[in-house]
Image: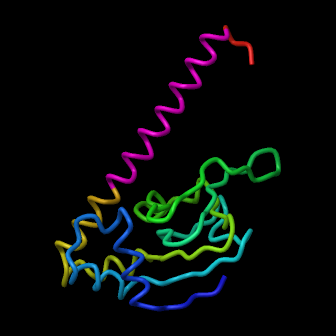
Amino acid sequence: MSVVIDEPTTAEGLRASVLATELDTIELARLAEVMGQVRLRDGAWAVREGEQRRTLFVLIEGRLDVTHRSEGSDTAVYRMAPGECAGTRAFVDGSPRKAGLRAAGDCVLLTLEPDDFEALLEQQPRLVLKVMRALFRITHSNLMRANQESDQLRNYVTRSHGRY
């Protein structure tokens, strides 16, 4: 994994993300200054399930598979599209990664480290508040999607009387 800092591209990519929904141009530029940029080749890992990394990832180009490890192999459970974020829980609470992130083709990610983000708190408190609201919306959306998938599975099992 190679890290390349390119602030104009970072700001442009960030603008299209759900993380930047409420940010004005100045706030967007300030957040972009503290973010990194990672280019991954097809099949490369941004992070593996179980790692302690707290990095928040924002996909700005390409596709990224969210994977879960089961019975010794990694299975893609969701394919991210540009503008989506991953790693909100680990970013906020420091818990181990519950999923891996693997490039599905070449892709570009923005990265945000908790220490860099927290350093903005004194100088840019409204920026931090807006990003935290975005993280809440992302987490809520993920929870709603998981609930919907659970309901669909429950309905399938109920209609088929437990037969697969």
Vertical arrangement, residue 122 with respect to residue 155, above or below: below
**Magenta-drawn stretch contains 22:** no
Which of the image's four quarters has the C terminus?
top right
Residue sitting at the far top: 161
Residue at position x 55%, y 57% in the image: 80
Q: How many marks?
A: 0
Q: Horizontal and vertical percent for residue 40? A: 65, 77
Residue lying at 82% horizontally and 50% vertically, measured from the top left: 72
Q: Is residue 100 left or right of residue 33?
A: right
Dividing the picture into quadrants, the one containing residue 49 is bottom right
Q: Residue 130 at x, y = what percent?
A: 23, 66
Q: Position of residue 143 (x, y in %)?
A: 43, 42
- Is residue 142 one of those drawn in magenta? yes
Residue 48 lies in what quarter of the image? Answer: bottom right
Colour pattern of the rendering: rainbow
Compare residues 156 and 97 and report the one nearer the observer: 156
Q: Which residues are magenta?
A: 136-160
Judge left or right: residue 94 versus residue 126.
right
Q: Position of residue 84 (x, y in %)?
A: 46, 61
- Name the quadrant of the N terminus: bottom right
User: Relative to 26, is 43 above or below?
Assistant: above
Image quadrant where residue 158 sits: top right
Secondary structure mainly formed by the magenta segment: helix
| Residue name at image x 63 percent, y 71 percent | 46
Up-down: is 60 above or below 139? Answer: below
